[in-house]
Image (tube, rainbow, N blue to C red):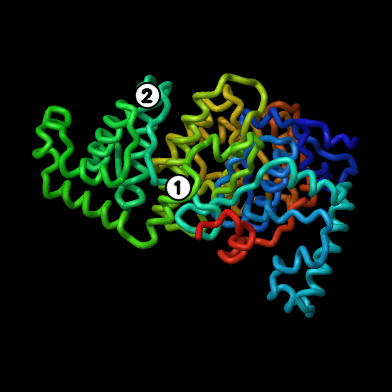
Amino acid sequence: MKAYEKLGAFYLGRRFDPASGKIDPEPLLYDARDLTTHAVIIGMTGSGKTGLGICLLEEAAIDRIPVIAIDPKGDLGNLLLNFPHLRTADLRPWVDPAAALTAGLDTDAYAARQADNWRQGLADWDQEPERIGRLAQAVDMALYTPGSNAGRPLSILGSLRSPPATTREDAELLGQRVQAAATGLLTLLGLEADPLTSREHILLAQLISREWLAGRNVELPGLIGAIQQPGIERLGVLLLDDFFPPRERMALAMRLNSLLASPGFASWLTGDPLDAQTLLYSASGKPRLSIVSIAHLSDAERMSVVTLLLAELLNWMRAQPGTGSLRALLYMDEIFGYLPPTANPPSKVLLLTLLKQARAYGLGLVLSTQNPVDLDYKALSNAGTWFIGRLQTEQDRARVLDGLRTAGTDIRQLESWLGSLGKRRFLLHNVHETRPEPFATRWALSYLAGPLSREQIRRLTPAQAAP
């Protein structure tokens, strides 16, 4: 058995010498347990950042580690493009006709060339096509498209289910869950909702909390009625009608009703429930790689989905027993706007909570970003592994070098390495190792077709798509 097939050893690539460009023939193996202290992938567009992320997720899948992958760009659906035989007919539906035209080939000839390229690429990195088959068989793969019936539907708001008793009895955890639910709803309505100052947020949180404490699910039609007639005399010390007059409550109810009545909203109410256990494991208990694609959504809709998903995952995590091994992964392909250094979007507090607490439960986070200055410094300090690719600006390099000053390598050497990184070349800084390692990423098992169109997603998930 090859060394990289050992359980818990992720084959990410090979070491290379930045001065000569020479690649070491021995594989670089990353200990999966190190992901319990989380990781960030940093690199400008074109650095190979998404390719590295896909390789990491492939290794997790082969080791049967369940994954929830949030995909704001539409690239991660490529993980479902697994073709062990690498036949021309397998690749033909997924090649880019424009790329074939540019190459001066028809689609069949271009697909044949891509199949040959993939076969050769795997061989160059000491991988056999049979490994693609092991990847496809190890986990159940699902491509979810909330708010759309192109892929597997995900019911974000079909029912705001009452959390389990363990959550309801924990005031802090219940408060976080209620806040996320209220924020997710209001964000979907396009309303900024500060939990401390927004009347809309305060009222919705009260109504949701009341139902959940009684063990009841919150249904949207009932919530619309409760906004108009809350059955609450006071909010704080103020009378309800003074704090939030009936006319303005009616405006909020109408806004939520209009959303509920819109033709496109039905897709938010159908499909698998937003349930972390369902996203991580199939009904038969098989580990699942769930890709939640949000590339097709508006900014407000994306924030709503991410907020509700993170809150659900946090709730699931708190129900698990402690462990020192890697139990599951949360991967996000572009974190920009969700964990900024200054602003406080609703996703930020949830991500910071996960970064601080998830290690004890065996949940690892891998967050990818183009610019380190766009990421809250507390997130960087809570990540034990940094995968650093080519950076765009001096400011980005300075931010990274500042974090690497205790890495055990001469800072001038690190600066030289960072300046020499090309495509698919990264610097691995791992607090569990003695020094940073420059490495080249391996060839991906999945066929990398680029961002998938709506029709391509439909083709990938015909049995899962909603009618």
Give the image location of residue 197, x and y in percent. Answer: 24, 38
Instruction: Identify the residue at image location x=52%, y=54%.
Output: 145
Instruction: Identify the residue at image location x=14%, y=41%.
Output: 244
**Residue hosting label 1:** 155
| Residue kind at label 2, given as amino acid type | Arg
| Residue kind at label 1, given as amino acid type | Ser
- Asked whether the beta carbons under mark 2 and mark 1 sit within 8 Å of each other, the answer is no
Q: CA distance from mark 2 to mark 1?
A: 22 Å
443 or 111: nearer the eye?
111
Residue 150 visible: yes
- Figure quadrant of the N terminus: top right
Give the image location of residue 56, x and y in percent. Answer: 70, 42
Q: Secondary structure at mark 1?
A: strand
> In this rendering, would 209 be left or right of 246?
right
Q: Is residue 397 above or below residue 37?
A: below
**Residue hosting label 2:** 168
> In this rendering, would 229 be left or right of 397?
left
Question: Mark 1, residues whose alpha carbon is within 10 Å: few (<14), some, or many (≥20)?
Answer: many
Instruction: Count numbered badges in the picture.
Output: 2
